[in-house]
Image (spheres, rainbow, N blue to C red):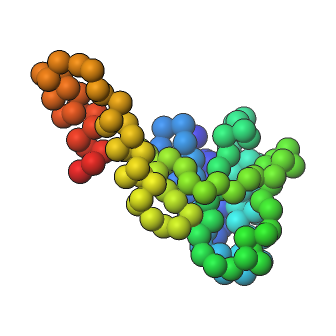
Amino acid sequence: MTDIGVGVSDSLLTSFEDDTTVSLPTTSAEEVSCLQQDVDAVYATSNMQFNEEKFELLRHGHNLEIKEIMLHTEGGQGITPQPHFKCLGVQLSEHCSIQYHIVEAVKKARTFTSREPETLLTLWRAPVQPLLD
């Protein structure tokens, strides 16, 4: 999997375990085309099958012209833009806001309701408190 970035020229390619991210700040249609070329290069050089149903596209900014340009998978399926997605445990938002992440963390914290106080404290310290810190 060390060759996964070969051929990617303009985009930032990051991998962690089985997740790979291809990202590029774009301000023009030409840069969106460069991003598509880099996505295609990942397909060509990785020798791996990707689950195209799990592809996520997050767009920031106000330029509606470049937001209308569709990116595609190797199979020609359009990659649908998402309003937010989870990356390494953090909810990223198209508005560059942490609000959605906070709302989801609070929802998760509120699911621990009818348990003993000692159990709740343990559950708070392990999975919940790090999300809120």
> What residue lies at 30% left-to-right and 45% top-to-bottom?
131
x, y (%) of residue 17?
Answer: 48, 38
- Image height of 32 relative to 87, above or below: below
Q: Is residue 110 left or right of residue 94?
A: left
Question: Total number of numbered labels?
Answer: 0
Asked if residue 14 lies left or right of residue 117, the reply is right
> Residue 71 placed where, x, y %?
77, 59
Q: Is residue 26 visible?
A: yes
| Above or below, comparing residue 18 to residue 119 in the picture | below
Relative depth, front residue between 2 and 12:
12
Q: Nearer the viewer, residue 10 or 23?
A: 23
Outermost residue to the front: 114
Of the 4 image quadrants, the one containing the N terminus is top right
* Residue 119 position by quadrant: top left
Q: Nearer the viewer, residue 40 or 122?
A: 122
Q: Is residue 105 left or right of residue 63?
A: left
**Which residue is rendered at x = 67% and y = 46% of the image?**
55
Quadrant hosting residue 49 = top right
User: What residue is at 52 percent from the left and 60 percent from the top?
Assistant: 93
Percent of width and height locating residue 7: 69, 59
Residue 11 visible in the current orientation: no
| Viewer-side residue, 47 vs 31 | 31
**Farthest-out residue, left:** 118
Give percent across and percent down for residue 27: 66, 81
Which image quadrant for residue 115? top left
- Examine the rendered structure and indicate whether residue 65 appears above or below residue 125: below
Q: Residue at x 80, y 62 (%)?
A: 70
Name the residue at the right extreme: 76
